[in-house]
């Protein structure tokens, strides 16, 4: 996906009137256990809501949906001796083909976690 498409997607999600069952905004909460639990919940919610994909987005204020930026770097976040993406991939059962992407939004750095709907 291109940087321009990621920025457009972020703005589309920000335009929602509130968080949805399949979209969650975070400031800098990077607790691995929370991320793992939310991945499963968001994936299931996306399926129930008829969406192909769910999203967790860091760097967006929950209430206002303003871009506040984040210093979260999923590739540098460690859980024990493993990087967060590998730890998540090994911990989630059934396995979920998620992807982290960093977007340099004009208003600040945003991290997007894209989670496919449960099958």
Image: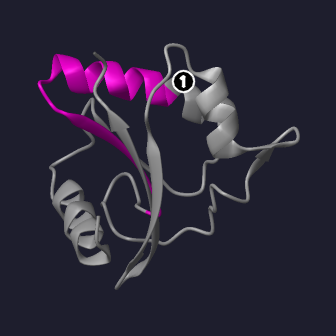
**Which element type, helix, strand or loop, lies under badge 1?**
helix
In the image, residue 66 above or below residue 116: below
Q: Please say whether residue 24 is visible from this viewpoint.
A: no
Where does the image place residue 29, in percent across and percent down from the top left?
A: 61, 48
- Residue in the foreground of this view, choosing between 98 and 49: 98
Q: Residue at x 27, y 63 (%)?
A: 10
Disc 1: which residue: 37
* Lateral position of residue 20 relative to residue 74, left or right: left
Q: Is residue 113 above or below residue 66?
A: above
* Residue depicted at 52% across the width and 57% down the height: 27
Q: Could you tell whether 99 is left or right of 47 in the image? A: right
Q: Which residue, as the protein is rendered here, is positioned at the far bottom?
A: 106
**Figure quadrant of residue 33:** top right
Q: Residue 103 falls in which quadrant of the image?
A: bottom left
Seen as rendered, the residue at the extreme right is: 81
For image coordinates 19% across by 69% down, the residue present is 8
Q: Position of residue 77 (x, y in %)?
A: 73, 53
Q: Is residue 87 visible?
A: yes
Location of the C terminus by quadrant is top left
Magenta segment, which residues?
38-59
In the rendered structure, the answer to whether residue 41 lies left or right of residue 93 reads left
Residue 119 lies within the magenta run? no
Answer whether residue 40 is magenta in the image: yes
Q: Quadrant of the N terminus?
A: bottom left
């Amino acid at each position: 996906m291109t940087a321009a498409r990621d920025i457009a997607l972020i703005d589309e999600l920000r335009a929602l009137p509130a968080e949805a069952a399949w979209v969650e905004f975070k400031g800098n909460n990077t607790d691995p256990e929370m991320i793992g639990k939310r991945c499963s919940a968001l994936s299931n919610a996306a399926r129930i809501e008829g969406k192909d994909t769910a999203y967790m987005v860091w760097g967006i204020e929950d209430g206002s949906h303003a871009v506040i930026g984040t210093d979260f770097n999923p590739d540098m976040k460690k859980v024990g001796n493993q990087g967060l993406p590998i730890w998540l991939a090994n911990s989630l059962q059934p396995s979920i083909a998620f992807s982290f992407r960093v977007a340099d939004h004009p208003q600040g750095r945003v991290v997007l976690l894209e989670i496919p709907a449960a099958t």
